[in-house]
């Protein structure tokens, strides 16, 4: 896990968001252990309390669970819950202003789709 810290957002929040991204990307899967608080703190030269705060948010969101004496583990269904909440947030918060901007510029769906980058090995 590599990180470049942004001064505009608390470090614990950036760390939490990075773990969420790793779950969404499938890097961390259901049942996988998160790196220990001490290890993350040492790797990034940050206070262990900062790491604990990030991990506690993930616990509060039921994305990871504490196993006494063993560490933190990604919960069953964490990726699915994250995908649902990210989709809902996109559709309710990000898409409406984007759709309005596209309409103002006269860009329809067909034009937009013509400009979607191709995935490797895909032909159009």
Image: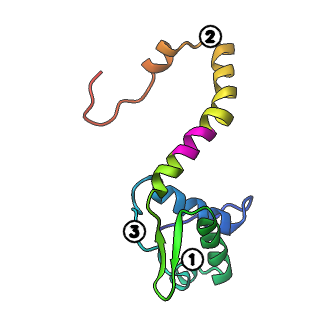
At a point 40% along the width and 63% down the height, the residue shown is 30
Residue 83 lies within the magenta run: no
**SS at circle 3:** loop
Q: Which residue is mark 3?
A: 31
| Residue denoted by label 1 | 44
Few, some or many residues within 10 Å of mark 1 (<14, 14–19, 20+): some
Going from N to C along the chain, the mark reached first, 3 or 1, is 3
* Residue pointed to by mark 2: 106
Question: What residue is shown at x 53% (from left), y 58% (from top)?
Answer: 20
Looking at the rendered structure, the secondary structure element under dot 1 is helix
Instruction: Please report the residue visible at 58 percent of the width from the left and 46 percent of the height from the top.
Output: 85
Q: Magenta span covers which residues?
A: 84-89
Give the Cα distance between marks 3 and 2: 47 Å
Is 87 magenta? The answer is: yes
Q: Looking at the picture, how far across and down is residue 34, in whole percent?
A: 47, 73
Instruction: Give me the disc on residue 83.
Output: none
Do the residues bearing badges 3 and 2 touch, measured as CB atoms within 8 Å?
A: no
């Amino acid at each position: 896990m590599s990180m470049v810290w942004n001064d505009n957002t608390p470090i614990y929040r950036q760390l939490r968001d990075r773990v969420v991204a790793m779950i969404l990307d499938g890097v961390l899967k259901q049942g996988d252990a998160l790196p220990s608080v001490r290890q993350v703190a040492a790797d990034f030269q940050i206070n262990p309390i900062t790491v604990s705060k990030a991990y506690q948010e993930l616990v509060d969101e039921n994305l990871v669970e504490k196993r006494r004496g063993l560490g933190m583990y990604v919960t069953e269904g964490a990726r699915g819950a994250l995908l649902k909440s990210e989709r809902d947030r996109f559709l309710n918060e990000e898409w409406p202003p984007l759709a309005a901007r596209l309409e103002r510029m006269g860009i329809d769906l067909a034009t937009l789709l013509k400009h979607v980058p191709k995935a490797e090995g895909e032909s159009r």
